[in-house]
Amino acid sequence: MTALKEKIARLIEATGPMSVSDYIALCLFDPEHGYYTTREPFGRGGDFTTAPEVSQMFGELIAVWLYAAWQAGGAPEDAVIAEIGPGRGTLMKDMLRTLVRLDGGFAGRRFAMVEASERLVAVQKETLSGAPERPAWYGRVEDLPDGPLFIVGNELFDALPVRQYVNTTAGWRERVVGLGEDGALIFMAGAGAPDPTSLPSGADAAPEGAVFEAAPAREALMETIAGRLAAQGGAGLFIDYGYEGPALGDTLQAVRRHAYDDVLAHPGEADLTAHVDFAALARIAGAQGLGARLMPQGEFLLGLGLLDRAGRLGAGKSAEEQERIRGEVERLAGPEGMGTLFKVLAVPREVAVPPFDAVS
């Protein structure tokens, strides 16, 4: 039993079953034993690999999009270029190198990292120690300096806690984490019920045991970001795995040592995520007057020139190196890799930015 599992069991014994949302928050962010507060989760030595760790091409193409969005927004001199939830800082490192190469005038601009974890801030500062520009670090979006904001979040929303509701003989009830007779953590149906208007179509006919997920923490963060973009200008780009519309289904999953794990098995030692409802995020952005557009990651990267960039990287290289680059392309954009499951949501205030300009 992990130290956090013992702590959670004691909390349940003292106060009763806890919501799935509270369980996720403890697993990921507990000050003493939380996954993100105590571990290095990224890369081959961690538990999972994100797109920036797969290839430099990912960050380079994100930078190309940011630069185009900045130009479409009138190339404001007082722009803030930010990343939220920056992991090890690899994405920002590749973006900074590319942006300065695209436009030498980007040197000296305001770059920012939004990161709440002091441990990860230290990791990011080490990663960016040789970067052409030095970002400033902020704990919240609200702390960022004023000005048009051009912000990127990669695998951000999937890590925010979700609430789950399960269909029972008594109707929809909140799913909670309790203790079984042997003291093990188990899922149970609690007393709380969801707002009926939040349930997706088909919920009335759902079978017993069906699960619905709501994500108030995600929606609150998107409201904050969208409100800032609507008020001061700019654009946001958010990449994550998820689905395009409301749906029933249990998507909560744990990853440990690059393999799926039981969600209740190793609290604090496994990453917990849930698929993102992009339609909900797009509605929030649209309510603020932003032009939300969505497409698969593969289509997005290919539309920005992934194949051309791969060809230039591989030119004159050994056959082994060229094969490695081809593998990176397949992993980033192929249907068996991240290309279909991962989606890219763009929320510009002004005009659509390629490759989203052809998306209705």
Image: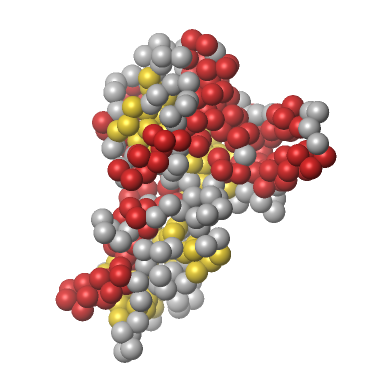
Q: Is residue 33 above or below residue 145?
A: below
Q: Nearer the viewer, residue 150 or 348?
A: 150
Q: Nearer the viewer, residue 343 or 56?
A: 56
Q: Is residue 307 above or below residue 11?
A: above
Residue at the spot 60% in from the left edge and 35% down from the top edge: 56
Residue at the spot 62% in from the left edge and 39% down from the top edge: 55
* Horizontal side of residue 8 vs 259, given as left or right: left
Residue at the spot 37% in from the left edge and 48% down from the top edge: 218
Can residue 183 be seen at all in this image of the molecule?
yes
Can residue 194 be seen at all in this image of the molecule?
no
* Horizontal side of residue 360 vs 141, given as left or right: right
Residue at the spot 50% in from the left edge and 55% down from the top edge: 46
From the top left corner, tell me how far across and down residue 355 is, in percent: 62, 29
From the top left corner, tell me how far across and down residue 224 is, in percent: 31, 36
Q: Is residue 21 above or below residue 317?
A: below
Which quadrant, please, contains the N terminus? Answer: bottom left
Which quadrant, please, contains the C terminus? Answer: top right
